[in-house]
Amino acid sequence: MVRDLVAAVKPNDPKEAADQRWMLDWINSGAPLWRLQKPATPPQHLAVYAILIDDSTHSILIVSHLLAQAWLFPGGHVDVLEDPRQTVVRELAEELQITPAFHPEFGDTPFFLTVTQTRGHNSHTDVTLWFAFQADRDEPVIPDLREFGEVRWVPLDDRTCWPGGAFDLGLERFLSKVRARLGSGRFTGG
């Protein structure tokens, strides 16, 4: 199932294509895919991001992740034998107390993928599937304050309106891909 999800992603650039090849080789190797023990056993494991998109304002939700000390997307590690689609839905319910639908433009398969070395003292490799959800920025979210310092909607088309600080290393590549898919500047607001 994980192999099928990874294989379904259409890479947008050479880095995403290389990450996809690495992921498929890793899956085919028989190595454990799930984190078995916190923080980093095995040293590479599956994770998911939930990208909440408000189509009416062409904006997305980012979170100030306390442990990572970076602006990221909500998400987390995939539990042993858990379907990553269930993980991403579970993480949204746990972290923001919401249950949005997968975005109709992207469906329930990942739209983007990355293989990223995390920062900090317990560094490990997150093999991350990025899923898109349809959301309304006016609907309330209740962030888990043990995980997030802040939750913020930001415009897809104007990075100058985003907060300063660290972000996921794949962010700019993701934004390029999602803008190409949704179109840039076709919405007002943000």
Image: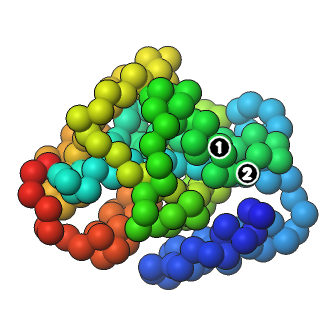
Residue 9 x %, y %: 57, 74
| Residue type beneath disc 2 | Asp
Q: Which residue is mark 1?
A: 87
Do residues under tags 2 and 1 come within 8 Å of each other at their CB atoms? Answer: yes
Question: In the figure, 95 relative to 54: above or below?
Answer: above
| Residue type beneath disc 1 | Thr
Q: Nearer the viewer, residue 42 or 187?
A: 187
Q: CA distance from mark 2 to mark 1?
A: 6 Å
Q: Is residue 118 visible?
A: no
Name the element at disc 2. Answer: loop
Q: Residue at x 57, y 36 (%)?
A: 91
Residue 152 x %, y %: 27, 35
Question: In the figure, 143 relative to 152: above or below?
Answer: above
Q: Quadrant of residue 153?
A: top left
Q: In the rendered view, does 100 fall on the left or right side of 93?
A: left
Q: Which residue is mark 2?
A: 83
